[in-house]
Image (cartoon, rainbow, N blue to C red):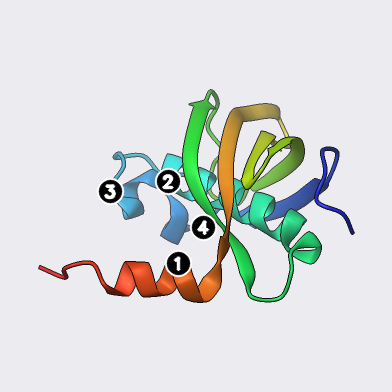
Amino acid sequence: MELKPGIRGRATALVTQENTAKAMGSGTLEVFATPALAALAEKTCWQSVAPALEAGQSTVGTKLELAHNAPTPVGGTAVCESELTAVDGRKLTFHVTVSDAAGPVAELTHERFVVADEKFQAKADARPKT
């Protein structure tokens, strides 16, 4: 697989008590939390391009523009679909949509960068911890 625009991804998440806004601290209601939705979007994106990366490479999220427009209740399933829309050197840009049985839930633009695993981890480990 070649790292180029057009790569698509798809993932789902069942809304449970553990990923509600109330449980995650992002609100008081028992609906799919925005942080959980963001994590689903990131997961969908990175997994979609992982087969196109070289050994020892991965991607890291750097930017997320998110419009979470409709609630998904406990017991519902959020369906996330991503498309890689641009490759600019190591920068990858994705368009992401999330829907549930009732229709559209969210739309996102997400940027990730391709990194060398060991170099990136060493840089992170060298940062002060306190």
- What kind of element bears circle 1? helix
Label 4 vs 3, first from the N-terminus: 4
Instruction: Give me the residue at 73% from left, 63% from top.
Output: 50
Residue bearing the label numbered 1: 120
Q: Are marks 4 and 1 in contact (CB under 8 Å)?
A: no
Residue 35, numbered circle = 2
Q: Position of residue 73 (x, y in %)?
A: 54, 42
Q: Are marks 2 and 3 in contact (CB under 8 Å)?
A: no
> Does residue 127 sit above or below 35 in this rendering?
below
Please tell me which residue lies in front, 52 or 75: 52
Identified by mark 1, the residue type is: Phe
User: Alpha-carbon distance for marks 2 and 3?
Assistant: 9 Å
Label 4 vs 1, first from the N-terminus: 4
Residue bearing the label numbered 4: 16
Label 1 vs 3, first from the N-terminus: 3
Q: Position of residue 60 (x, y in %)?
A: 52, 55
Label 4 vs 2, first from the N-terminus: 4
Q: Are marks 4 and 3 in contact (CB under 8 Å)?
A: no
> Does residue 16 sit above or below 120 in this rendering?
above
User: Alpha-carbon distance for marks 1 and 3?
Assistant: 30 Å
Which quarter of the image is occupied by the C terminus? bottom left
